[in-house]
Structures are given as C-alpha cells and as structure tokens.
Image (cartoon, rainbow, N blue to C red):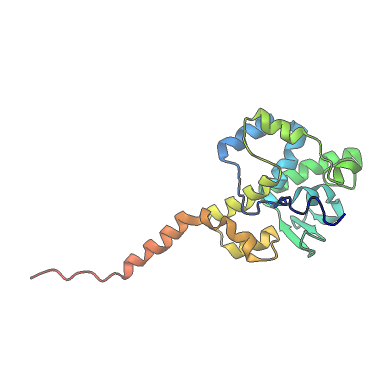
Amino acid sequence: MKENPISKVERFRENNARVRFLEPAEEKRLRRALPKEREPEVVLAMNTGMRRGEQFALKWTDVSIGRRLITIERSKNGEKRHIELNDEAFDAIRALRARGLKTGSEFVVPSTESEREGNYPYWFETAVAEAKIKNFRWHDLRHTFASRLIMAGNDLRTVQELMGHKTMSMTVRYAHLSAPHKREAVQSLKKYTPKEEPKS
C-alpha cells in the first residue's frame, strides 16, 4: 500500500482540561448507592487523589498506619510520592485493614489479578447510575480531591505536590475554582485607598 488508510482519521485526544467533581448532594447519593463493602475504596480515592491503578496496586507494605502515610513507589510520572491521610482516609484504611486481615491479602484493596491489571468491575458505574449522577467516572474522584483542596483555599503549589503532578500546567486547570478567594484577596487592597479629607 502506498499510504496508511487511517492516516487521515482524526486521532482521539484525552480532554486533560476536563474537571468534573462531586457536589455534596451528589456525594450523599453516591454513598447511599455504593455496596457497603466498597465504600472505603471510594472514600480513600476521594481523600487521597490516588489514581485507580495506584489504589488497586497498593500493598500494605506501602502503608504506614502509625505515621498515617501512604507511599506510591512509582507514580504515573515515574517518581515516588507520599500521601498524608486525613481522618476520612485513615478511617477508610482501617476498614480496609480489617477486611484484609480476614482475607490475608497483601493488597490494600482486595481484588483479582484481572482488576489490578485494569479490568475493573462495574460496581462503581452501577452505583453512579443508581445515584443519578451524570457524566462521572472513577477518575473524577481524583478531580474531586483537587477541586476541594482549591476551594478550601489551598495554594496551587501544595495541590500540585499532593496530586503528584510533574508540572504546574496540570494543576492550573483547577485555578478557576479559587475565584472567591481571589476576590477576597483583591478586595483587601481597599485598606490602602486614601480616605478623603472631610471638607471644611
């Protein structure tokens, strides 16, 4: 053949600018729809920003319960990353630990080899549909983590480190969510505005 017949077909590009996060009301509905034994997995993802593959590959040797710390030995960008556990994530880890002691699994999320290779079951998608949440995927739990950090007033540099983004450009997509804090910042300048002297 003189030329590749699919060379003119437009390639699919992932929309890296997409930011979809859970609203509080959506989270309540999702938690009610989740299988009870699976809820800690979702809570852990939402409070650590771990990717699904990272979470399913996580072993107990990567978790320090005493230090409330998770270590991702090799993240997507090839570097080691440490994740602090907030109270919700810590409770989820303890729930998963109790489950793991029963099964004897070395993995934090007991799962099949197939699941660890990325062939995930549909329980999450089923729960999302049952909760009537539109346009929401597992990866959006990671967006929820980052978005809530920004909306809580944390700076982009801190969010970049917590997300394990190699460059700031990956983190900047969340910057628009800090608008209220930006308004407060510029509003603070009014204290420097000279006061008019009262007319005599």
As rendered, which of 102 and 191 lies closer to the eye? 191
Q: Residue furthest left?
A: 200
Residue 34 visible, this angle: no
Up/down of 155 relative to 109, above or below:
below
Question: What x and y, as percent, mark residue 136?
Answer: 65, 40
Task: Judge from the rendering whether residue 85 lies leftward or rightward of residue 101; answer left or right.
Answer: left
Q: Residue at x 77, y 44 (%)?
A: 94
Q: Which residue appears at 78% of the width and 34% of the height?
A: 122
**Which residue does the image show at 89% across and 42% down from the upper left?**
114
Left or right relative to 138: residue 17 = left
Quadrant assignment, res 161: bottom right
Q: Is residue 129 above or below residue 78?
A: above
The answer to whether 120 appears left or right of 46 in the picture is: right
Q: Position of residue 197 (x, y in %)?
A: 17, 71
Quadrant of the frame with the C terminus: bottom left
Q: Residue furthest top?
A: 130
Residue 150 visible in the snapshot: yes
- Residue farthest front in this picture: 2
* Residue shown at the point (72%, 34%) measured from the top left: 125
Picture mark count: 0
Quarter of the rendering occupied by the N terminus: bottom right
Estimate the x, y position of residue 167 in percent, counting from the top left: 67, 66
